Image (cartoon, grey):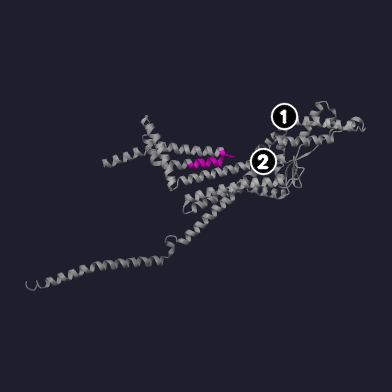
Amino acid sequence: MSTDRPDEPDGERRGGADDELAEPRARLGAVEDQEARLARQLAAGPAQGPPGPPRRRVRSFLAALLIVLACVLTPLSALALWARSEISDTDRYLATTAPLARDPRIKTAVTDRVTAEIMQKLPVDSLFGGTPLGGIGQALDEGLTGFVHGQVERFVDSDAFVTVWTDVNRDAHGAVEKMVTGQGGGAVEVRDDTVLLDLAPVIARVKAALVEQGIPLASRIPEIHTSYPLVHSDALPEVRTTLRVLDLAGFWVPVLAGACALGGVLLARRRRRAVVAAALGMAGGALLLGIGLSVFRALYLDGLPADVDQPAAQAVYDALVRYLRDAVRVVVTLGLLVALGGWISGDGRWARTLRGGWRAGLGAVRRVAERAGLRLGPVGRFVHRRKAALGWPAVALTALAFVLWSHPTVLVTLCLALGLVAVLAVLELLDAPGRERGAEARGRRAA
């Protein structure tokens, strides 16, 4: 017994020493494990780790580049669609040129041109056997000119002229593609740097009217193929080439622009900001095209020869670019709407405030309806759980409707946007978050 007691203090001292070394040993083991993990990561290489700053910079650069390309391609897309529709779609071409028949500037220019051609071919001297009549002959010529001018003016103001003008342009549309490629023919002729429209059907109708009005001499007027200048420009060959290229490009340019915008958004680190930037940039590109059309209009009119009727030339130019300007307005409107939607869905303070006001207002309407007897029941709970899943298909269907619309206008764009807002408002009205939270709380209490 005596031999065991002296040994007990030594055992206790050894146990205490082991306890004091346990913590340092554990720390040392943790450090060794950490060093081993770092060694394994270094041996595996940087490819298995998170992407570093250089990769993020390359990705951001590619995203910005694609968005810039989309902005540059936007005005070219509008030009390509306009050129293709005017060249390949007869109804679209007639919708462009038919309103010119009722334009006072065109009617005045056509009346003067047809009157001059008829008086030049009308054999007035044969009435008097070629005898010079002096002042009487001049007065007779002026009176006859006034009478012919009145008959032409009466015809040009009638619906019959609208019909003839439309028929002439319908026949002319078959030669538009030839005109673009530099080969004239039919009712459209390209002569040097001028695009000419044959007014022979108009003169034939006026000649028949003169015969009916008691001027049988008009029947001796030969067939006249007088030409009315639609477009006059020294750069017509270059314009023809450009239109040909745009016609061949067709709808592929808009597709490429949309693909670039989508790719830029998907590559961007902050996609919501990328959506806003792309939408505003593409709207800006379309706006620059609209400004360019106005600048080119002034340059085009200033470069016309002195014998070209300026008001009529203005009317023709405005008619030809009418739908192109409409496309510019549509793209600008759509870009602003998309940018607004992207901003509202963001995390900014004003965006959150606006969304909060939207939910609070519609929530108040829902509560009033519930007090009046509305019971959403399972519908409200379902919408509350699936509101986002229901909202995105509405956005996709709205976008699809816009793409499939043959020729969307600003009004169509705004109506589609208002329809989407109405659908989102209905989803918000059907949302019943209070009932959902109450059900969850009752479930937790029962558990």
Identified by mark 2, the residue type is Asp
The picture quadrant where one finds residue 3 is bottom left
Is residue 276 rendered to the left or right of residue 19? right
Q: Which residue is mark 2?
A: 318
Is residue 87 rendered to the left or right of residue 143? left
Picture coordinates of residue 35, whole percent (x, y): 34, 67
Residue furthest out toward the front: 135
Residue at image position (47%, 46%) is: 343
Name the dominant secondary structure of the magenta segment. Answer: helix
Picture coordinates of residue 329, whole percent (x, y): 58, 42
Magenta span contains residue 398: yes
Residue at image position (37%, 37%) is: 432
Q: Which residue is mark 1?
A: 158
Q: Which mark is residue 169?
A: none
Magenta span contains residue 210: no
Callout 2 secondary element: helix
Is 323 in front, or is 33?
323
Dot 2, crowdedness within 10 Å: few (<14), some or many (≥20)? some
Question: In this rendering, which labeled residue sits more in front, label 1 or label 2?
Answer: 2
Is residue 32 rendered to the left or right of residue 96? left
Picture coordinates of residue 346, whole percent (x, y): 45, 47
Picture coordinates of residue 271, whole percent (x, y): 47, 51
Q: Which residues are magenta?
A: 395-410
Identified by mark 1, the residue type is Ser
Callout 1 secondary element: loop
